[in-house]
Amino acid sequence: MKNVKHLWHWGGLSAAALAVAASVAFVLLPRDVVVVRPVHGTAVQAVYATGTVEPSIMMPIAPRIGARLVELDVDEGADVRKGQVLARLESEDVTSNLRQLEAREDFARRDYQRYAAMLKQGIIARQLYDRAKADWQAARAATAQARAQAGFMTLTALDFGRVIRRDGEIGQLIPANQPVFWIAGRSAIRISADVDEEDVARLRVGQAALIRADAFPGRIFEGHVLSITPKGDPVARSYRVRISVPKDCPLLIGMTAETNIVVRRTEHALLLPSAAVDAGTLWMLRGGRLVRVKVGVGAVGADKTEIVSGVSTRDLVVADPDSSLKEGAKAHAVVVRSTP
């Protein structure tokens, strides 16, 4: 029985020792890492901005006097010509006032003519004539103003174009200066985007812009910078940038668009996946061991990053490093792939 106990105790010690040895061996074994070789390609540095599709020429049509809408002659999507009647507002009060002023003007005119005849005959003093003339001129000016106000009750198109929006229904009270119609001129559409003040200094008129919209997934449209507003928004700390849109572009007015304005393009640049680079450093596999290396970084994109110094196409770079990597630790490259 003693021999049996001795053998059991000895076997237990052996199992523990083997477990420790196995753990040490596991730690010392090279870990598997996914690596990538840098490749040459085109590096693009761009400024990102969101904007809205709008017509190059857009004309709001609004009444100058608040009144009730009584007639609609066109609707959204209609093509209109210059001077065409779009709608009419209630004008009874304005028309009544115009008639009263016209009557007063006629009376003042006849009174002035009578005083002018008497002045020629020397019957009245010059002062009475001058007063009659001033009264007639004042009445004529008031009538002209009322006549213009009566004309404001009819909304007309300022130029050729298309009605892209109508706000207001018959019977609705329309406040003064509130647009009832929005008319887009017969010109190309564009994108108006807001660019952060930190990036606007890198923009120039004519730079290429890549345009994407959620309404057309997977499609990219090419435009260019048309203009940069010289005055920024001090609250939003941004500047408005106008971007052209191709003639055959299916984007519609009012859509939201994402733009990437290309500020630099480098051909035959050395590229790595952006996930491999962290704050100007990356992990390499040299001689079976991990080495952390500082590199020079150029253009940074969502998928690719340009490396200007520190690596070559022969190097093996850890594609997606994590915090568990240790300097000098052994590692084994299980996958070698090129930068996408």
Image (cartoon, helix red, strand yellow):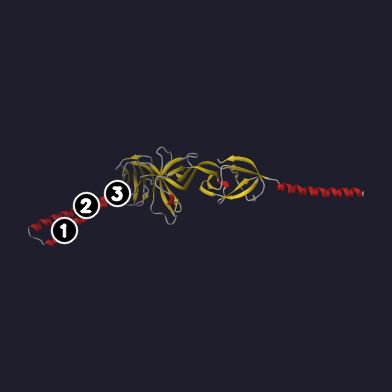
Where residue 271 appears, as percent x and y from the top left, is 53, 43
Instruction: Measure the alpha-carbon separation of dots 1 and 2.
Output: 16 Å
**Residue type, label 3:** Phe
Mark nearer the N terminus (2 vs 3):
2
Q: Nearer the viewer, residue 91 or 158?
A: 158
Name the foreground residue: 50 vs 267.
267
| Labels 1 and 3: the sequence-earlier one | 1
Residue 246 x %, y %: 41, 39
Q: Residue at x 88, y 50 (%)?
A: 6
Residues under numbered marks 2 and 3 in contact, where contact means CB atoms less than 8 Å apart: no
- Give the residue pinned by disc 3: 152
Task: Give the vertical position of 303 relative to 115 (above or below).
Answer: above
Q: Secondary structure at mark 1?
A: helix
Q: Residue at x 48, y 46 (%)?
A: 45
Location of residue 124 in the rendering, given as x and y in whole percent from the top left corner: 10, 61
Of 336 and 157, the residue lying toward us: 336
Taking depth in this image into account, of 185 and 83 the one nearest to the observer is: 185
Residue 318 lies, in percent from the top left, at 61, 45
Q: Which residue is mark 2?
A: 102
Q: Say which element carries label 2.
A: helix
Quadrant location of the C terminus?
A: top right
Q: Which residue, as the protein is rendered here, is positioned at the far left?
A: 121
Label drawn at residue 36: none
Crowdedness near tag 2: few (<14), some (14–19) or many (≥20) residues, C-alpha within 10 Å: some
State the residue lying farthest toward the right: 1
Of pointers 1 and 2, the one earlier in the residue sequence: 2
Q: CA distance from mark 2 to mark 3?
A: 18 Å
